[in-house]
Image (cartoon, grey):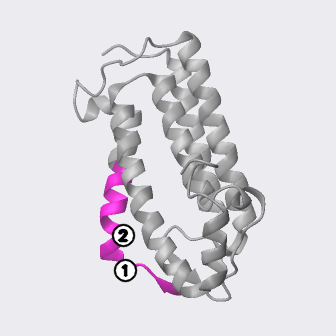
Amino acid sequence: METTASWQYWSVVAAWVIWEIYWGLSARGVKRAAAREPFLSRLPVLIALLAGIACMLVPQWISAYLARPFLPQGGIFFYLGYAILVAGLSLGIWARSVLGRNWSGRVTIKEGHELVTAGPYALVRHPIYSGALLINIGSAIALGWIGGLVAIVLFAVVFVRKIRLEERMLGGHFGEKYAEYRKRTNALIPFIF
């Protein structure tokens, strides 16, 4: 397996670890759930996310094919990918901090749930997913493995599914207020989608 330089690989892994640590720490103190997605509905999401992470960071554990490069490794591609990764990490952390106590890892309505439309939520309805996709795209470019492309697809499928569930739940909870918010913002990419 051809690999990127060790420091480059570990710097990508470190960014993923920072993401996970931040998410774990920021999950403390969130509002209690009033309604949430059942665990069996969430299980395929968890499996797909774990598979995506494995495809991205340790593709050789799954298949030698996934560990093959699709881009020249190192050099400009690493720096470009890492810049995209950091942008995604920053967007995700910003969005999570603006969402505050209303955040949940599951599709959930919280007790006293507020519709957040400030900060990155003024640009897109799901900026945490936008940030996570940028992290995936950046990681795939920085590492250059075919497994990264598979990870992007897995994460995109998960996020589209979660967006549909969240939009249905939020629309049912906030009614016309959410419908108006949907009219003025896109789901993931400003002015496009």
**Helix, strand or loop for disc 2:** helix
Q: Are marks 2 and 1 in contact (CB under 8 Å)?
A: yes
Q: Position of residue 130 (x, y in %)?
A: 57, 49
Quick check: 71 left or right of 134? left
Quarter occupied by residue 124 = bottom right
Any part of residue 31 in sight:
no
Q: Which residue matches tag 1?
A: 38
Does 41 appear above or below 147? below
Identify the residue shown where x is 66% and y is 71%: 181
Prevailing secondary structure class for the magenta stretch in the rendered image = helix
Q: How many marks?
A: 2
Identify the residue shown where x is 22% and y is 30%: 63
Q: Position of residue 37 (x, y in %)?
A: 42, 78
In magenta segment, residue 40: yes
Identify the residue shown where x is 36% and y is 61%: 45
**Helix, strand or loop for disc 1:** loop
Q: Position of residue 128 (x, y in %)?
A: 60, 55
In magenta segment, residue 117: no
Quick check: 48 left or right of 127? left
Q: Which residue matches tag 2?
A: 42
Picture disc at residue 127: none
As shown in the figure, which amino acid type bears the numbered disc 1? Pro
- What residue span does the magenta drawing correspond to? 33-50
